[in-house]
């Protein structure tokens, strides 16, 4: 993978679809503080050749998350994006997200870094402890850790 800035790192930002707007706000603020880091949000940041029109329609109230969409296209998009990244930052906040769990498992299978921000009190869950390189209880705790890297 060729990068213009060798210090630049790219992380996949896995999170529940129901939390997408608040996570997007945090993502943009975090990226403004750390310009050497790019977070790829699967709901808003498209890889070449992909487009999440469903999310745009959901945000406009034109469809729900369970309206007809191509599940194979979404999963393929997400798996290709995870494989492209240097690591994954997964948000576990209590809103169910089957995709987030599978994305974490795929990242671990690929041997890339896995950071989990778990805000629902389940940060000591055995699966999170095994699958994550590090688990944080809050965004602030993650930000403090990241600032030392």
Image (spheres, helix red, strand yellow):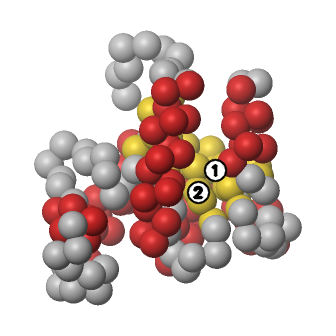
Q: Are marks 1 and 2 in contact (CB under 8 Å)?
A: yes
User: Distance from label 1 to label 2 (Cα)?
Assistant: 8 Å
Q: Position of residue 14 (x, y in %)?
A: 50, 58
Q: Residue furthest right?
A: 124
Q: Residue at x 25, y 45 (%)?
A: 47
**Circle 2: element type:** strand
Q: Identify residue for label 1.
A: 114
Q: Relative to residue 76, is residue 142 depicted above or below? A: above
Q: Identify residue for label 2.
A: 90
Please indicate whether residue 139 sits to the left or right of residue 58 in the image: right
**Circle 1: element type:** strand
- In the depicted view, which residue is nearer to us: 30 or 124? 30
Determine which of the numbered discs, if any, sits on residue 35 in the image: none
Q: Residues within 10 Å of mark 1 (few under 14, many from 20)?
A: many
Q: Position of residue 46 (x, y in %)?
A: 25, 48
Q: Earlier in the sequence, mark 1 or mark 2?
A: 2
Q: Residue at x 31, y 80 (%)?
A: 65
- In the depicted view, which residue is nearer to us: 94 or 6? 94
Which quadrant would residue 66 be assigned to in this image?
bottom left
Report if residue 37 is visible in the image: yes
Q: Relative to residue 69, is residue 129 depicted above or below? A: above
Q: Residue at x 74, y 53 (%)?
A: 138
Report if residue 99 is visible in the image: no
Which quadrant would residue 17 be assigned to in this image?
bottom left
Q: Residue furthest top?
A: 5
Please indicate whether residue 125 sits to the left or right of residue 92 in the image: right
């Amino acid at each position: 993978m060729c990068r213009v800035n060798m210090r630049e790192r790219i992380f996949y930002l896995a999170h529940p679809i129901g939390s997408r707007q608040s996570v997007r706000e945090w993502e943009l603020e975090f990226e403004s503080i750390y310009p050497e880091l790019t977070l790829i949000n699967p709901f808003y940041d498209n890889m070449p050749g992909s487009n999440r029109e469903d999310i745009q329609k959901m945000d406009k109230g034109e469809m729900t998350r369970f309206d007809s969409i191509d599940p194979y296209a979404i999963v393929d998009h997400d798996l290709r994006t995870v494989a492209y990244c240097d690591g994954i930052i997964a948000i576990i906040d209590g809103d169910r997200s089957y995709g987030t769990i599978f994305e974490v498992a795929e990242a671990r299978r690929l041997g890339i870094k896995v950071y989990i921000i778990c805000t629902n009190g389940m940060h000591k869950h055995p699966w999170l402890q095994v699958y994550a390189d590090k688990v944080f209880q809050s965004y602030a705790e993650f930000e403090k850790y990241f600032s030392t890297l």
